[in-house]
Amino acid sequence: MLDDLLQTSPLIQRLKDLGVCLIAVWMCHCSLPGSAAASEVSWERLTAGIQVTMWDPVKACPQVPAMLMLQVDPDRFRFSIHHYRDEGLPTPLSITGWQQRTDAYIVFNAGLFREDYSYLGLLLKGGRSLGGKKHRSWQGLFAAEPTDSKQRKARVLDLAFEGFAEDSPSYLEAAQSLMLLDHTGKLRVRDSGKRAYQTVVAEDNTGAILVMKTADIVSLHDLADCLHRQIPSIQQAMAMDGGSSSDIIGSPDLLRAVQDVPSHNGWRPLLEGNFGLHIGLPTVIGISPRAGMRDLSSSPASMSSRPR
């Protein structure tokens, strides 16, 4: 009799109906565009402290092309700013020329510049200003080599939330550019519809620095949205110069130390510099091992879904 009462109770029937509605809403939400589960990034080891992948988010983000992604441990590697005038060069060098000059493991393009090749934003090397002044509306600042040893060795700073004194900088190396995605998850670029090759620098929740270059053109808004939805470990990200200036290269020694296996075919052409047109770049950022950490002993590339 109690079972019959429960089955016919209006309250129980309402609860059942509510449960069915909640399940239906949940199923609809899961099927909506943009609600796909976050991607798990599988990394290949280049050397101790640097991992690489060719990440293709096309299923979750149809408008976003595959991209080369590097994950760098700033405790093992230092980032340094290079500007052609500061180094006494008559003209900007190509990415290949910069790599040969600096002997860095990795070199990638910095932020935007004017027609006379002067940097468009704050630019510091060794704590010295290289002529650029802080841009009022651009809030992204890649900063490395802190003056306080307790601070992280490299950061993506958001000037909308964090201060940075030009006359007494807290980091010796710095390059300002556009903020792309902040720690609140907000996209910091408008949907202009403009598409180009893009270079992105991000900071993840382990303190690692991610350097990315797209293999094809994409809008910054679509790229920011995809990174936010698919790689939640990214804390904040900024966009460096794009278009024909978007460039990256690895040193021949670094690439020779990695076994040539089929799994490398996706990212290797981009990191070797065998992709796209290489124009002169007035400013680049180099990634080099810290003292006592230069080790390119050959070993099979290892796969991992964790940073370090």
Image: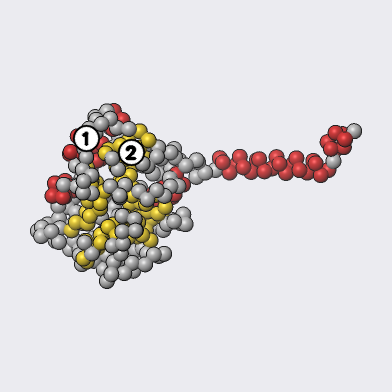
Q: Which amino acid type corresponds to the residue marked 2 in the rendered image?
A: Thr
Residue 142 on image: x %, y %: 31, 57
Q: Where is residue 257 drawn, in percent x and y?
A: 21, 34
Locate residue 143, reporting x and y percent: 30, 58
Whether residue 191 is visible, yes or no, is no
Question: Is residue 148 toward the left or the right of residue 14 in the image?
Answer: left
- Reading the image, the residue beneath label 1 is 297
Q: Any mark on residue 53, and which?
A: 2
Q: Taking 54 as reference, is 18 left or right?
A: right
Mark yes or no: residue 1 visible. Answer: yes
- Horizontal and vertical percent for residue 34? 50, 45
Mark sitting earlier along the chain (2/1): 2
**Tag 1: residue type?**
Ser
Looking at the image, which is closer to me, 237 or 301? 301
Colour pattern: secondary structure
* Tag 2 secondary structure: strand
Given residues 97 and 241, the one toward you in this image is 97
Name the quadrant containing residue 26: top right
**Residue reaching furthest top?**
262
Residue drawn at x 19%, y 54% is 281
What residue is shown at x 39% (from left), y 48% (from top)? 206
Whether 302 is drawn above or below 164: the answer is above
Kindly identify the residue that appears in the image at 36 percent across and 41 percent down. 308
Label 2 Cα crowd, 10 Å radius (few <14 / some 14-19 / many 20+): many
Seen in the picture, residue 164 relative to 60 is either above or below; the reply is: below
